[in-house]
Amino acid sequence: MQHNVNWLQALLVLSLSVTLGWTVEVQRPRGVPLTKRQFYDEAKPFTCLDGSRTIPFDRVNDDYCDCKDGSDEPGTAACPNGSFHCTNAGYRPTFIPSSRINDGICDCCDGTDEYNSGASCQNTCKELGRKEREALQKLAEITKEGFLLKQQLIEEAKKGQQEKQSRLSELQDSRKGHEDKVEALRTVKETAEQPEKEAKERHLKAWEEHKAALRLEKEKAKMAEVFLELDDNADGFVDVSELQTHQELDPDGDGTLTDTEAQGLLGGAHKVDSTEFMNMWSNMKEKYVSEVCPPTPSSDLDKDPDSVYPEDDLDEDAAGEDDEDDDDDDDRDDDDDKVISPLQVLEKLSVCERERWCLLCNAALLPFSFRALEKEISFDFGPSSEFAYLYSQCYELTTNEYIYRLCPFNRVSQKPKYGGSETSLGSWGSWSGPEDNKYSVMKYEHGMGCWQGPNRSTTVKLTCGKETAVVSTSEPSRCEYLMEFTTPAVCLEPPNIDTQVHDEF
Amino acid sequence: CPLVAAAAAMGALSLGWFALCLGVAVAVDRGNFKTCEQSAFCKRQRAMKAGQSPYRALLDTLELSDSRVTLQLINDNNKVHLLLELYRLQGNMTRVKINELKPLKPRFEVPDVLIADPPTEPLSVVSRDENGVVLSLGDEARRLIVSAQPFRLDIVEGPQVLLSLNSRGLLAFEHLRPRKDTEDDNQPGLWEETFKSHTDSKPNGPTSISLDFSLPGVEHVYGIPEHADNLKLKSTDGGDPYRLYNLDVFQYELYNPMALYGAVPVLLSHNAQRTMGIFWFNAAETWVDISSNTAGKTVFGKMLDYVQGASETPQTDIRWISESGIIDVFIMLGPKPADVFTQYASLTGTQSFPPLSALAYHQCRWNYNDQEDVRAVNQGFDEHDIPCDFIWLDIEHTDGKRYFTWDPSKFPKPLEMLQDLTDKRRKMVAIVDPHIKVDSGYKIHSELRSKNLYVKNKDGADYEGWCWPGNAGYPDFIRPDTRAWWASMFAYDQYEGSTENLYTWNDMNEPSVFNGPEVTMHKDAVHGAWEHRDLHNLYGFYVQMATAEGLIQRSEGKERPFVLTRAFFAGSQRYGAVWTGDNAAEWDHLKISIPMCLNLNLVGISFCGADVGGFFKSPSTELLVRWYQAGAYQPFFRAHAHMDTPRREPWLFGPENTALIREAILQRYALLPYWYQLFYHAYLTGQPIMRPLWVEYPGDASTFAMDDQYLLGRDLLVHPVTEEGARGITAYLPGQGEVWYDVHTFQKHNGAQNLYIPVTISSIPVFQHGGSIIPKKLRIRRSSSCMENDPYTFIVALSPQRTAEGELYIDDGHTFSYRTEKKFIHRRLTFANNTLTSRSDALFHFTLEISSE
């Protein structure tokens, strides 16, 4: 019986040693990694690993430095350039500088570095290992999902890229054609304008009178329309609060239409009926912006009694509606053989239409969109354009004091949370990660200048994440900001093998 | 911290005022600070030219007691009587006091600076006649001669005049008087004075004093810090005098006599035969004129004089001018440099013995932004394997510049942060400035107000001025009860979030008052019976004194304090360390750090350093590396930077530069046992730590003006590289028949030679004196505490006689037990006949396992 207990105890000790990794410890001097065990043979004199010297083996780990490379003191702090191997069973083995042996601070999670300092170190390797495995697992999940998202991003980018490229080349082709067309149109227009001018002179007076009457009529109609539009609660009165939904009417331009100001616009009354409103309308009509833009400008024009000269500006309006539908516009341009004086058109147009017209007026628009497209294509959106989706997006992070805004490939800014003006923290500069990982860091430069300091600049560190978001901001040095940004675009392909913490046994 | 950078922090509070400053950010705005011409009393006094003194000694009033001689002086122009007191002090010193015989009210005499009433020795009358009295100052034919008309004092030794007082007749004592509306009285500057927008009401009228000293045979004088100037003081003829008035000077300029943050009115004179000192014991605004009859002469001119035998004896004349108080002068007669240091230390005390870790490396920045930042910096040192003992927090760590508090969002858990540092055996310093935010919700303020401990303005209300927190009050540190209260605020239960590894930094204690005259307190502010005018230069001294006392008390008297101060006065050495304020990242600022600290060391303040890297502006990598190399060999070794400069922790400049900086810091840590021993000596004896070469080689005239190299203690000679792009330096190795060893190569060089040494970016030229033994610790760890049980290595550098001597001092490194319980080891080491022996140098009861390798 007695015998059995001893045997059991021995077994228990043995199994404990195995889990703590002590069985290997006895086979090599303190601080030596397994890989170098063969150089430390108790039976032979020790030769420094740099070969510089051979010493009796009892001078290994005798707390006196004999070898220039520190290899005779793997387990003491005697050599300035030595290193100590922590086995860290259950976690990752590691080397620490030998200056950390017995310095009173637990560096190895197995506590083996503090064998003679009085520091009591807990073995935290298992716990660390567990945590790390968990973290790695989580990271692996994120990476996996992130990488899938990245594949989608790449696909989308590829499509987008092709589209843009083809549009660019179309634009390039059509630009020349367009220029020719403009030239032709100009000639047509000049020819057409000559008789028109004469007729105009003849009928000018009558025309003006007629027009004034028409305009008054139109004004009334418009006003009635506006009145209905304003009278939100349909009580037959327009009141101050209803008027305040139209901030554009603000007389002093400070951006707020106050009660008093609104009342002023209503001639001092708190609310007015439609007759009274007629008198007030002249105060507002300059600024008033209708709540609805007519869905098809053509219908509006058609109804307009002022359309003496039937004009075909439909295509142009349509173009203004969506400036990206350039191709269609071009097609319609081909049919366009009537020309109108732009001024005349403008006079007849509603505010919304005017805006559209103006967009179109910018015949320069074409070269602009051409340039914008060219610019977008010229950006380095990563090896597979996986960052393209960030273009023209903005991401915000709100901290205690500020709202930070990152618009990738454009700019970074900061705005006080409780009012105050926005400060530029830099405009897109370049990818500036290390050579082997260039796309891990973005640099934004030349932001607003600092007193006695540099212009503000921001470094954006990109890490793999499922979400695209700014996760932190800081200002490590005055006017030099640091942002952490997660995006699937930097997720690396997860390794196929199972990520396992390597235990040294 | 500097003044104008306040613009960023305080712009909204006082926009108008700062707008002025913003325009002149390039260098010091001289217009903010007075010249002698703009300081009424200086102008008045300086207008008086040398000549016959109106003062006459009334010999029949002479009274001789055991300890002193008294005698009346009369000014024959106004018949005002003065009382002259002469003391012979133990240790070869003479004290001369002159006050009004019957002042209208008492005049200020500086309290708390002397460590005790200096013990006297009897004076005796050797001879007297109607023209004077001869008093004996001891055995060696040393005499004090009082001449009656005109009044003058001469101290002679045998046939040689050592020093004369009032020999140029510049004694002037403006007696207190009631204001009369006479024309004389209405002279500008007598009863009121205006500088820029500030009017100084002068209720006491003119009160200034002046006295001249002649030093025959002297061409070299030093001391009277703090000035950004060379070690050897220059003639002030044709320029402004050196000014002593503690001021927060924004972006100070180099090589001029403008006042800076601190003032020690002690001047040393030296020639090959004798070193002496003059301690002008006055805490009011003071100007010092220096003229020399050889100052203008070239070396060739001097040689010509010598050859022709036509030379007059070289002589240096000194004139002190102070705004108020009395004339009280300690004349330290040497004769050796070490004697002068001993003499001065017997008056104002010695360097405090700091905790060992305070001698290690300090990492500071305005500001480490938050706890995460501190954690990252702490970790950065480990990641890059660079040792560091202290991380510092500047003003931004507080809750709205309310000292003794923490910003709740950036530093929500100070105890956790301090524990993180403790875990790495590192420590922290947090700033505590003396300006207190006027805010009824702030405990410190409301206690000061309710206890009525603030300085008062001239109308009797609490004095208020602008500083970092906006409107601020200034505790009246001159009062012992204020200091006791302040000290109690450092108790762990009062200073929330503080622990024993948190130490203190007192900045802005000149005091700095952003909207005050010359950026300081109004002179007519009131401290009880006295005007601020009388004691201005003492304010910072008291702040540090009270803070150090607080740190001692919180540990119940067990732990040594560590307090850094910017403002200082004579005696400040007793309370901690001093740094040279807001310097700039320029090569000239690196160079000037040496003479600035040497002059401080000569007047007792050994624990001196300059911001490594330069505070304002951003250093080039080369400058930063060179500054680390130089700073590693200066007593206080702290990197610091302005908040508008890019970050510059040691590892931010690429692996090569990280390695260079690491190496400089490693050299510092290896030498910590030697540094510690030097501080122990400084504490025991008052000998400086950083020494001009002439201190150890007093007869070697070639060393007298040298301030690009120095000795650490006696045995290490340091010649840091301070030139951009240097390819070599020329070090002077002193000592005929002596040898020096390059500490890096162990190469031996003969003394008494200029040695050219080629240098690379890794070179820090340092030499060990042949005949010395220097203790080192070669196992460099992450902080000095981690190294406490490590073995010592003795570097034995043999003299030509193949002998060497040294010592080893060891104690626990942080408590007072070395003096309360004599717990230390102090061994004297001798190497002779190829044997190293040690013997006990003192009683010791301290046991520690040491081995040596």
Image (spheres, coloured by chain):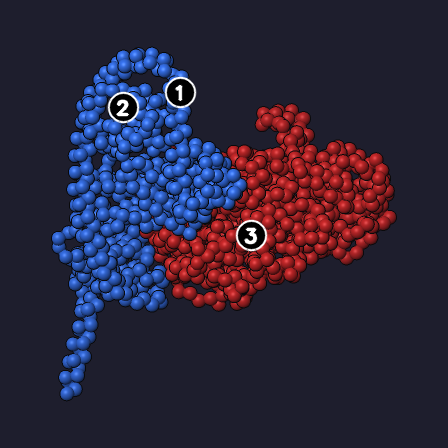
Chain colours: A blue, B red
Question: In the displayed structure, would residue B136 be above or below residue A343?
Answer: below
For residue B208, side relative to residue A167 (left or right): right
Q: Residue at x 72, y 50 (%)?
A: B459
The amino acid marked with disc number 2 is: Glu
Q: Nearer the viewer, residue A248 or B648?
A: A248
Q: Is residue B292 left or right of residue B25?
A: right
**Residue named by callout 2:** A311
Identify the amino acid type marked 1: Glu
> Which dot, 1 or 2, sits closer to the camera?
1
Q: What secondary structure is found at the residue carrying circle 1?
A: helix
Counting from the top left corner in percent of width and height, residue B535 is at: 68, 49
Q: Is residue A210 above or below residue B844?
A: above
Horizontal side, residue B378 vs residue A135: left or right = right
Q: Which residue has dot 1 on it? A: A208
With respect to residue B153, does B476 lie above or below? below
Q: Residue at x 54, y 33 (%)?
A: B23
Q: Quadrant of residue B306?
A: top right
**Residue B358, image x, y percentages:** 47, 54
Q: Is residue B327 visible?
A: yes
- The crowd level at tag 1 (other Cα within 10 Å; few <14, some 14-19, many 20+) is few
Question: On the rendered image, what quadrant is the C terminus of chain A found in?
Answer: bottom left
Query: Label 3 vs label 2: CA separation?
Result: 80 Å
What is the spatial separation of the Cα atoms under label 1 and label 2, in whole angstroms?
Answer: 19 Å
Q: Which residue is mark 3?
A: B433
Chain of the residue under label 1: A
Amino acid type indicated by mark 3: Asp
Q: Are marks 3 and 2 on the same chain?
A: no
